[in-house]
Image: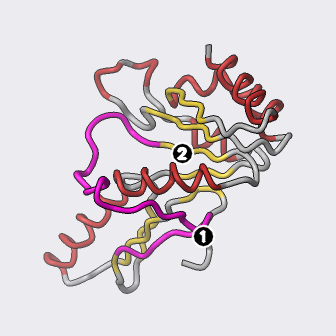
Amino acid sequence: AEEHAVTFSAGLAVGGLKPYCVIYSTFAQRAYDEFIHDVALQHLPIVLCLDRAGLVGEDGATHQGAFDLASYRCIPNVTISAPKDEVELKQLLYTGLRFTHGPFVIRYPRGCGEGAPWREIPFREYPVGKGEKLLDGERVAVLALGPVANRALEAARRLKDETGLCPAVLNMRFLKPIDTAI
């Protein structure tokens, strides 16, 4: 099913549509070959949404989405993003819609979000490959991707309260291309 979903999305993109193909992260391996040959090498503008990315607990061993970042990062012509919260997911879905330079991957976890007020926020296109500094700091920088950015921010604040050392926390937002100027 995953292989067909990706190839069908490629056909829709060739026909001028902008498909959003949603697959469990762990099952993206089944569509890997099709994604390379039918989408990435042709620079087709599909949005591949990798649901249940990361560790998903009670879903079982076969549903842990732990390999998608490493496996999809090496594919040419692909952009890979991971939102830290619901607002970023909304904005990355919009950014993916507007993106025309090839496949756009959005990776997000299973379960509840962070509680960010996404409904009130207007749509905004993110600059592709640009992250954001969440916390200024000194001597140490923590680079985070996806919801773990929120945990890194919490840990940095706690470290500052307990030791006085405050690391910078950077929400990378994109794995590929990676922001080297942040």
User: Is 126 displayed left or right of 41 in the figure?
Assistant: left
Q: In which quadrant is the N terminus drawn?
A: top right
Spot occupied by residue 4 in the image (x, y as percentages of width and height): 69, 17
Q: In which quadrant is the C terminus drawn?
A: bottom right
Would you place residue 158 above or below residue 30 in this image? below
Amino acid marked by disc 1: Asp
Q: Main secondary structure of the magenta part?
A: loop
User: Is 140 displayed left or right of 176 in the figure?
Assistant: left
Would you place residue 38 above or below residue 74 in this image? above
**Residue 116 lies in the magenta-colored region:** yes
- Which one is in front, 18 or 160? 18
Segment colored magenta: 108-134
Quadrant in the rendering for residue 46: top right
Q: Which residue is mark 2?
A: 106
Quadrant in the rendering for residue 179: bottom right
- Which one is in front, 159 or 150? 150
Spot occupied by residue 56 in the image (x, y as percentages of width and height): 35, 30
In the image, what residue occupies the spot 56% across and 23% down?
27
| SS label for mark 1 | loop
In the image, what residue occupies the spot 51% across and 69% down?
131
Q: Nearer the viewer, mark 2 or mark 1?
A: 2
Spot occupied by residue 107 in the image (x, y as percentages of width and height): 50, 43
In the image, what residue occupies the spot 59% across and 31% down?
21
| Residue 179's disc number | 1
Spot occupied by residue 160 in the image (x, y as percentages of width and height): 21, 78
**Residue 40 lies in the magenta-colored region:** no
